[in-house]
Image (spheres, helix red, strand yellow):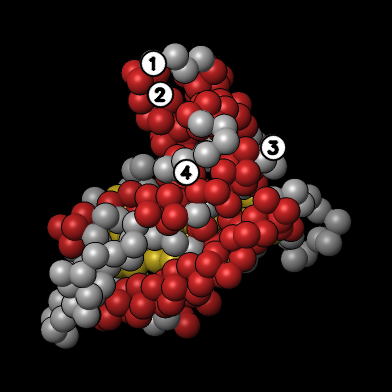
């Protein structure tokens, strides 16, 4: 890519990352958090009612230029995560939940494109490492899924797998390993993980983009013992864990392909939601 390449909506859509775009409802403000009293950048968007907070350290470490004219209607590329913070002025105060930007990119700036390219490279390295760990440890998945720590390790690896674009063009024209191929290659090992009672709660505790990708991967798993009903039970259990009565209803009785299609749609919306019904109020 040339030095002049920039992040824009067309490129982001082509890369399959449109779900990470937010539309600003106002200019980004650098001020103290009302409760924590920590200086943070406040990002208000049209898609999310609550404020998204961006660490000043992230901005300074990555030399992100928060331009004053970048305001209402402009787009930003964001990966989100929820975090509980202890008010620094009172060690006994209740923890405060904040919605944080774990990765943040401005559009229309060639320097941001260069930073995004480095970010994608790092994610592709994590992806490769995750696939290697799965290859080396998949025979132990049934045992690992029986403990909270083991389930967490499995989800850490599955969550690192995604179809990150190749921005240097080194593998253009070559087939890329998809979530479906990973799921079907390791189906015998992943089926007991999908059937584990620990999975739904562990999955919805992840960041929205991560839990949705892992959900997609598990949806492709073929259970040689449980058959199609294994997937039905998974959808029902996940629907209950989401904590939304409508989703629970749509996933509760799956008798036809139409029922399953509606269940997938409801779960997709719920898992990509920035806040689930089960999250702290």
Residue 32 appears left or right of 181:
right
- Is 33 in front, or is 22? 22
Instruction: Give the residue at mark 2.
Output: 260
Residue visible at 30% across and 56% down in the picture: 17
Distance from the alpha carbon under mark 4 to that under mark 2: 15 Å
Distance from the alpha carbon under mark 4 to that under mark 3: 17 Å
Query: If the image is split into quadrants, where does the N terminus sit?
Result: bottom left
Q: Which image quadrant for residue 281?
A: top right
**Disc marking residue 229:** none
Please report whichever mark, 3 or 2, sits nearer to the chain's N-terminal start. 3
Give the mark toward the camera: 4 or 3.
4
Say if mark 4 contacts mark 1, CB within 8 Å.
no
Distance from the alpha carbon under mark 3 to that under mark 2: 21 Å
Please report whichever mark, 4 or 2, sits nearer to the chain's N-terminal start. 4
Say if mark 1 contacts mark 2, CB within 8 Å.
yes
Tell me if mark 2 has few (under 14), some (14-19) or many (20+) residues whose alpha carbon lies within 10 angstroms of its own. Answer: some
- Is 194 in front, or is 39? 194
Instruction: Give the residue at mark 1.
Output: 256
At which x and y percent is residue 188?
Answer: 55, 48
Distance from the alpha carbon under mark 3 to that under mark 1: 24 Å
Seen in the picture, residue 231 relative to 201 is either above or below; the reply is: above
At which x and y percent is residue 115?
Answer: 33, 79
Instruction: Give the residue at mark 4.
Output: 221
Seen in the picture, residue 205 relative to 239 is either above or below; the reply is: below
Tell me if mark 1 has few (under 14), some (14-19) or many (20+) residues whose alpha carbon lies within 10 angstroms of its own. Answer: few
Tell me if mark 4 has few (under 14), some (14-19) or many (20+) residues whose alpha carbon lies within 10 angstroms of its own. Answer: many
At which x and y percent is residue 19?
Answer: 33, 49
Residue visible at 58% across and 70% down in the picture: 136
Residue visible at 52% across and 26% down in the picture: 229
Instruction: Give the residue at mark 3.
Output: 197
Please report whichever mark, 4 or 3, sits nearer to the chain's N-terminal start. 3
Dot 3 lies on which element? loop
């Amino acid at each position: 890519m040339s030095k002049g390449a920039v992040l824009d909506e067309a490129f982001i859509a082509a890369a399959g990352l449109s779900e990470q775009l937010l539309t600003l409802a106002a200019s980004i403000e650098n001020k103290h958090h009302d409760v924590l009293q920590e200086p943070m950048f406040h990002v208000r968007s049209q898609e999310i009612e609550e404020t998204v907070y961006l660490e000043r350290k992230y901005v300074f470490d990555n030399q992100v230029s928060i331009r004053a004219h970048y305001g209402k209607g402009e787009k930003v590329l964001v990966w989100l995560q929820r975090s509980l913070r202890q008010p620094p002025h009172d060690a006994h105060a209740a923890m405060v939940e904040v919605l944080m930007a774990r990765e943040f990119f401005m559009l229309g700036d060639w320097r941001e494109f260069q930073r995004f390219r480095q970010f994608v490279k790092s994610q592709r390295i994590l992806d490769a490492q995750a696939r290697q760990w799965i290859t080396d440890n998949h025979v132990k998945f049934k045992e690992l899924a029986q403990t909270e720590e083991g389930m967490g390790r499995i989800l850490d690896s599955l969550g690192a797998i995604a179809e990150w674009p190749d921005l240097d063009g080194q593998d253009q024209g070559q087939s890329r390993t998809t979530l479906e191929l990973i799921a079907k290659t390791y189906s015998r090992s992943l089926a007991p993980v999908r059937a584990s009672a620990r999975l739904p709660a562990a999955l919805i505790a992840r960041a929205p983009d991560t839990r949705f990708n892992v959900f997609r991967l598990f949806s492709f798993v073929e259970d040689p013992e449980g058959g199609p009903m294994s997937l039905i039970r998974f959808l029902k259990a996940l629907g209950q864990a989401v904590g939304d009565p409508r989703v629970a209803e749509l996933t509760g009785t799956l008798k036809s392909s139409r029922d399953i299609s509606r269940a997938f749609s409801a779960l997709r919306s719920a898992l990509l939601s920035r806040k689930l019904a089960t999250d702290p109020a």
